[in-house]
Image: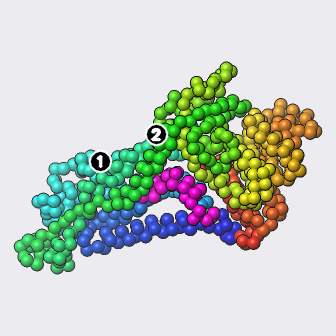
Amino acid sequence: MGNCLVNEGVSIFVILAWLGINAFLFVHFYFIYDDGIKFYYTREMVGSALAWARAPAACLNFNCMLILLPVCRNLLSFVRGTCGCCRHTLRRQLDKNITFHKLVAYMIALHTAIHIIAHLFNVERFMDCQLGEKGQLNDVLSELGAGGDYLNPIRSKDLNPTKVVFVTVAGLSGVAITLALILMITSSTETVRRQYFEVFWYTHHLFVIFFAGLVIHGIGQIVRGQTEESLKEHNITYCKDKYDQWGQIPQCPKPIFSGNPPMTWKWVVGPMALYVCERFVRFWRSQQKVVITKVVTHPSKVLELQMKKRGFKMEVGQYIFVKCSKISRLEWHPFTLTSSPEDDHFSIHVRRVGDWSDSLFKVYGGDQTEFQEAWKLPSIAVDGPFGTASEDVFLYETAVLVGAGIGVTPFASILKCVWYKYTHSDPNLKLKKIYFYWLCRETSAFEWFADLLQSLESQMLERGNSNFLSYNIYLTGWDENQATHFAMHHETQTDVITGLKQKTLYGRPNWDIEFGNIASNHPSTNVGVFLCGPASLAEVLNKMSSAHSSGDPRGVNFIFNKENF
């Protein structure tokens, strides 16, 4: 348990606090509507379904207030990168913004389902009361209210309950909210995001309809309770059984009802304003001119774009959003920066894996053999940079970097920057040792990154600092012909795949052994573990980080960090 708390203690606290607030709001508002004297007559008509509808509504307000905050990237980057008031353990929580965003979305979906089901029961029971099927008291309550002081929103026995859904503001906005939520959640699955990113991108912008419907949902004031003035004049305890004498005796005037004023806007106006500012900043930055200085086509279907932009400042491991208007005027895609802050340009590497990246290859000459002058290339828009977990690599004396496939891109920036600081004897450089692991399925995937590793390898040998960087490259897929070729050249001084002195390993790392060796080599050290790769690998490394941490602040502790876009 102690080891787990090293990595997940603050996250567990945040999640428990969030769940606790949800539980408190649900229980608190449930009893307000289930026991409150103001809603006594409403409960007589619809029963406990009233409380079951209103309690999740309160939780929806709270979670809809939170849902936009984790995707305010500029705000998070400011807090994480430029605001020094956050401790490292707290800043790590900002790197889990997308995970929290998803959890809040699932909570919204849960409370929406409860809210809808409960209101369906309410509509049915209101209709039964109007038809006189629920007793004389409910008959009288249904007939009350010649103006706006009624209790039963179904005002006619001839009204089809279905029309309540498609005629009232609450009904129409509720349908719009629900449809938008269903489309956003179903299109956010891992499969859809990876294979049909455009579907995810466009449907997620239904959040505009979602929040518009949310703000106006309560305007119709369907849920009604007795007014404070009426409660003073109409004693429910005395009058509830004398409903046939209401308005005839002074002790029991007819009760007057009113709807709850809309409250949702008070919860969401702040985050909505922040998000509008966020989008304005993104738009302003996206309009700034970007100059493409170089386009390089690498093996394994990787395209490198080197760019310049006035006032652009980056840190290691950060990412940007890119839009090519010639492909789409609306789509933005995230890419990790592969250049270092010391370079005179910033760059990204794009792997050809989908429709958009395929179009990018064609637009920027990835399929052409003829050289294109930079000024003739289509314009590109850039938003960012935004902070990630990799920025914290300099906070550790020892770091473990794990990249899978194209997930190696943030570590290209880190390795360049670290080596620059190391060779220039930067007094602020705390990092003393790097363990680098790169896992790839195909041999061609190594080629575009091997040049950087070869350069680092040769420079470390020249300076006699070969122990500064320990790197292990793993090939996880090969065929019989490749295996024969590897075996024939196994005795050569340099690796047959990468050209490095460090030989490529085949299969997957035994992480238990790797972490055990690192722990024994660096006792009494906080080791930063950084991953850019699939969720399955993240789960393994997170478990290893917990298993090999001592739990004692004076011992070795592995702090796990994962890239999230």
Q: Position of residue 463 (x, y in %)?
A: 87, 49
User: Who comes first in sequence, dot 2 or dot 1?
Assistant: 1
Look at label 2 and name its amino acid: Tyr
**Nearer to us in this view, 96 or 349:** 349
Which residue shows up at 17% across the image and 55% down it?
155
Horizontal placement of 325 versus 136: left or right? Answer: right
Which residue shows up at 41% across the image and 61% down it?
62
Q: Quadrant of residue 480?
A: top right
Identify the residue position indicated by label 2 in the image.
Answer: 202
The boundaries of the magenta stretch are: 65-90
User: Element at badge 1?
Assistant: helix
The answer to whether 423 is drawn above or below residue 38 in the figure is above
The answer to whether 377 is drawn above or below residue 173 in the figure is above
Identify the residue position indicated by label 1 in the image.
Answer: 172
Between circles 2 and 1, the one closer to the viewer is 2
The answer to whether 391 is drawn above or below residue 238 in the figure is above
